[in-house]
Image: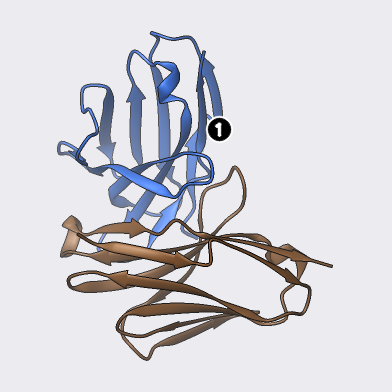
Amino acid sequence: GAVVSQHPSWVICKSGTSVKIECRSLDFQATTMFWYRQFPKQSLMLMATSNEGSKATYEQGVEKDKFLINHASLTLSTLTVTSAHPEDSSFYICSARESGSSSEQYFGPGTRLTVT
Amino acid sequence: EDQVTQSPEALRLQEGESSSLNCSYTVSGLRGLFWYRQDPGKGPEFLFTLYSAGEEKEKERLKATLTKKESFLHITAPKPEDSATYLCAVQAGAGTASKITFGTGTRLQVTL
């Protein structure tokens, strides 16, 4: 149980284009999902908290107009990196917290984004 | 501001050589402390949740303990397949507003 998937697992795009990453909870409903960014040999940095049916809450320093988050259902959240630049290249990981639970988060396998 | 510090940054053990990883934390209103395992290029895999000082949890060769200021992840007789980065995280805040803060991890390498 508690499986989270991400799609795609890796993507290469050209500078200036937009990329959408999907995060799905496969066997549970998730009112809250989280998006993280991880640079090589560094820990996870929380970018934003996504609540189903409401606007995402962004961490300080994260541009909400650049990283668009949509959480339209209890099993799906999407992160769109708009007008991507090489510095946006990173490992993006989502996690999901089961509805009614305030503790464990279950993580997806991550998406490797490379912007050329 | 919540802070999580893990040590050592990297650890190399021989197979069968037991050791402990440390996670020190400063948080207002701890709701839970988590241990995750992360393999290269993959998302973190959940290991344990600890809620209160004195609590212990075990899973195979791993045992996690918690005090008011730190947590230890004890690895008994490790095997090469235990090689990974081990992440500690703390949760603070209430209800759906709570969020998790991660430490930078300990990279464990177990050799034959």
Determine the image quadrant of residue B68. bottom left
The quarter holding residue B70 reads bottom left
Q: Depth check: A83 or B110 in front? A: B110
Residue A75 in sight from this viewpoint: no
**Which residue is more in the foreground, B69 or B57?**
B69
Residue A31 versus residue A55: which sits nearer the camera? A55
Disc 1 crowd rating (10 Å Cα; few below 14, some 14-19, many 20+) is some
Residue A113, percent across and down? 50, 26
In this image, A3 relative to B32: left or right? right
Q: Residue B45: tell me if it is visible.
A: yes
- What chain does mark 1 sit on? A
The residue lying at 22 percent from left, 35 percent from top is A61
Of all chains in the rendering, the one displayed in brown is B
Q: Nearer the viewer, residue B9 or A109?
A: B9
Which color was chain A given? blue
Residue at x-position 34% and y-position 32%: A78
